[in-house]
Image: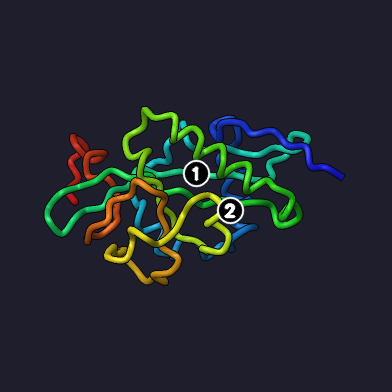
Amino acid sequence: MHAVFDLVPIAEVAADAVEALLDAAFGTDRHGRTAYRVREGMDAIPELSFAAREQGALVGSIQCWPVALHGDDGGQTPMVMVGPVAVSPARQNIGIGRALMWRAIRVAMAGGIAGDDALMLIGDPEYYDQFGYDDAATGAWRLPGPFEPRRLLARAGAPDRPGIVGPRIAHFAGAGKSA
């Protein structure tokens, strides 16, 4: 049987339904992971965040976040952190995650979003290499928490220089917060 699902902007889905899906896919302890520290204080980028619905039910989601490589040289390079990519445990391995990832990549590659040429994520290289992600540029990157270096991945266009990946400081401008 072929899966039939629709991809829609994540804004069309209730936030609590997305949270329930993330809990089902990654566990309720997921907020302690390093990926959450990387994007702390940021809102997902609406244009790059999607939901998969099957017969009206939420079965998958992808969110993308405005982050930056805060270089050891003092420079900041805007990037987009892709993920989490979540699929309902009952609907995995039928192409929902791949469809969500390709949609986010296609929209990012169309341009117009700061950092859209530097997509990065934390994930299994064996899965994400099909989307053009590898660790070629990430060897000198640091994260604000523990991570396996082989799982820190980026697509071509990501900066290849030392620094720490974290929230985009520019998004805090005028908000009274400092980095």
Dot 1: within a 10 Å radius of its alpha carbon, few (fewer than 14), some, or many (20 or more) residues?
many
Give me the residue at 32% from left, 35% from top. 114
Amino acid type indicated by mark 2 = Leu
Residue 148 location, x and y as percent? 42, 72
State the image quarter where residue 109 is shown: top left
Amino acid type indicated by mark 1 = Gln
Q: Residue furthest left?
A: 74
Residue 160 location, x and y as percent? 27, 56
Residue 93 location, x and y as percent? 72, 55
Q: Residue furthest right?
A: 1
User: Dot 2 corresponds to which residue?
Assistant: 22
State the image quarter where residue 110 is shown: top left
Which of the two residues, 72 or 28, is positioned nearer the viewer here? 72
On the picture, is 169 further left or further right than 54? Answer: left
Give me the residue at 73% from left, 39% from top. 57
On the picture, is 82 further left or further right than 146? Answer: right
Which of the two residues, 122 or 161, is positioned nearer the viewer here? 161
User: Dot 1 corresponds to which residue?
Assistant: 63
Give me the residue at 70% from left, 37% from top. 53
Q: Quadrant of the N terminus?
A: top right
**Up/down of 20 relative to 51, above or below:** below
By what rule are the colours in the image chosen? rainbow
Give me the residue at 67% from left, 46% from top. 96
Callout in the foreground (2, 1): 1
Dot 2: within a 10 Å radius of its alpha carbon, few (fewer than 14), some, or many (20 or more) residues?
many
On the picture, is 125 further left or further right than 166? Answer: right
| SS at circle 1 | strand
Residue 151 location, x and y as percent? 45, 65
**Up/down of 47 relative to 129, above or below:** above
- Residue 42 seen in the figure: no
